[in-house]
Image (spheres, rainbow, N blue to C red):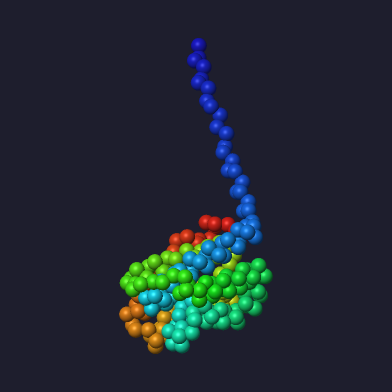
Amino acid sequence: MTAPRPATASVTPTIPAPPTPAVPHTLVEDAAALFTGCTLISVGIALCSGAKLLTGGMVGLAFVLHYATDLPIGQLFFALNLPFYWLAWKKMGRAFTVKTFAAVLLLSLLTDLQPHVMQLGPLHPLYAAIAGGLLLGVGMLVLFRHRGSLGGIGIAALYLQDRYGWRAGKVQMALDCLILLAACVTVEPSRVGWSIVAAITLNLALTMNHRPGRYQVV
């Protein structure tokens, strides 16, 4: 008599759950994010400014002109961004442009208000470079995740990539290097070296936390 075969459990193939659709940010969430990001960035600017440092992008260019002319950083930053709003409207759309304009205006006001509400003592340039760079990077990350930016060079890099095929990352890096080199005219070389540390810290904060597919917004 043949022994009965042991029953085998049927294996049901696992069907992956459909991805959860991204939930749009509300107007209140976007407004809170713009305020949070700009506040963090303004404190980062205060730390870098207190140690006579600078960074890349339009903020860095505003620093260079500030050290050369002694004009307020916030006003210089706002004025430098004015030519780029048309480009932002054409390349990134109305919502992005409106949020970017609001972020630039708010950051300009906060930056010029900062010396009246926060007084800083002597700062070691290494601390200012790392802490300031982190605050700038995290603040920009908040803006990016809510479809905003600080305008300027980033928008120009995207345009040159679409128009001529130049890689946006390489274009932005080249422009940042030119800004840091221009700083040698008004800032002592050792400060430029510390400024490079700030720029690297800023970009590391963005690179590690702002990757395609890691965070979805609509």
Q: Nearer the viewer, residue 217 or 159?
A: 217
Instruction: Please state if 37 lies on the left or on the right of 53 as rendered.
Output: right
Q: Is residue 178 at all visible to an observer of this figure?
A: no
Query: What residue is shown at x 36% (from left), y 79% (from top)?
Result: 192
Q: Is residue 54 above or below residue 96?
A: below
Q: Nearer the viewer, residue 44 or 218?
A: 44
Q: Position of residue 10 (x, y in %)?
A: 56, 29
Q: Is residue 60 above or below residue 25?
A: below
Query: Does residue 2 appear anywhere in the picture?
Result: yes
- Quarter of the figure that contains the C terminus: bottom right
Q: Residue at x 50, y 74 (%)?
A: 113
Examine the rendered structure and indicate whether residue 142 appears above or below residue 176.
above
Please report the residue visible at 49 percent of the width from the left and 79 percent of the height from the top: 73
Image point (60%, 61%), residue name: 30
* Rendered image quadrant of residue 145: bottom right
The furthest residue to the top:
1
| Residue 103 coordinates in the image, percent (x, y) | 57, 70
For residue 68, which quarter of the picture?
bottom left
- Residue 9 coordinates in the image, percent (x, y): 53, 27
Between 16 and 119, the one lying in front of the other is: 119
Residue 57 percent coordinates (x, y): 49, 76
